[in-house]
Image (cartoon, grey):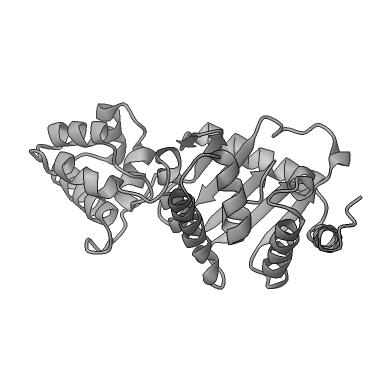
Amino acid sequence: MAGPKDLDPSSSPRALLGAELRHAREKAGLSQEELGQRLFVSGSFIGQLEAGTRRMLPEYARLLDTELGTEDFFTRNCGAAAKSRYPEHFAEAAEAEADATAIRQYAPLLIPGLLQTPAYARAVNRAYDPTAPEETIDEWVDGRMARARLLGHPTRPLLWVVLDEAVLRRETGGRAVMAAALRHVVGVMRQGRVIAQVLPFSAGAHKAMEGSMRVMEFKDAPPLVYFEGPGTGRLEDDPATVTQLKFTFELLAASALSPQNSLALIETLAQDYAHEELP
């Protein structure tokens, strides 16, 4: 259960809503669990709304106004908190990512967004929507680069990624783009800013073959997991699901190459792309 968190209401709409929600809930004499039962959600979900790690959707805002007697405060203000530069299916996950203290991610097909270069991100987004206007692609790339600024902090969040070997072998944007993208990953690894491991093809079948996964942990809120597919995404806080996905990540890390051997492989492939000698 998330404990109380002092928020600066001026910092963001989500912080304002979270602070007001906690105030209204405590004024009503309800625990997070009790309020969650009235909304048919978990107490952890209420705690994440209060901590600002989850966005307040209109359907919950209306229920909160009814249950807490706040007239239409949450309904009126949740729109401002919902505005995002990211696609709707990913917006909540991106916001949670910005508050995370640790992110553990398995990437089966692409270099994770936090580690992408602008050229790689452009190639990925162009592949997603071949007919999108160039201005739209520019906005998407800018959004992805804005996310990557999280790594500007020297220690937070902890970022630990397991990259399927397919990520390194799938030529995205051309050989020069791939060479630069892999060199960027090498750079952040050498800086000690990210732990990266490669899951080689030789590892065979594994527990996460159905798709990507991300586990995010927070200082003052329960962990979340994020599942993603083509044009879709789902954020989940169910404790059993979170525990299962943590175990899945541990199995992947145990089957992957060591960080040192992974670094050597990524460096070799970057050189091969640069010299057009990829086997």
Residue depicted at x 79% and y 47%: 169
Residue depicted at x 23% and y 54%: 19
In the displayed structure image, the side of residue 52 where residue 58 appears, left or right: left
Q: Is residue 78 above or below residue 15?
A: above
In the displayed structure image, the side of residue 201 where residue 18 appears, left or right: left
Residue 234's spot in the image, x, y percent? 48, 34
Q: Is residue 200 visible?
A: yes
The N terminus, quarter of image: top left
Q: Is residue 116 visible?
A: no
Residue 100's spot in the image, x, y percent? 48, 56
Q: Is residue 252 above or below residue 101?
A: above
Q: Is residue 268 above or below residue 108?
A: below
In the displayed structure image, the side of residue 181 where residue 82 appears, left or right: left
Residue depicted at x 43% and y 53%: 135
Q: Nearer the viewer, residue 30 or 182?
A: 182
Q: Nearer the viewer, residue 248 or 110?
A: 110
Q: Tally the numbered discs.
A: 0
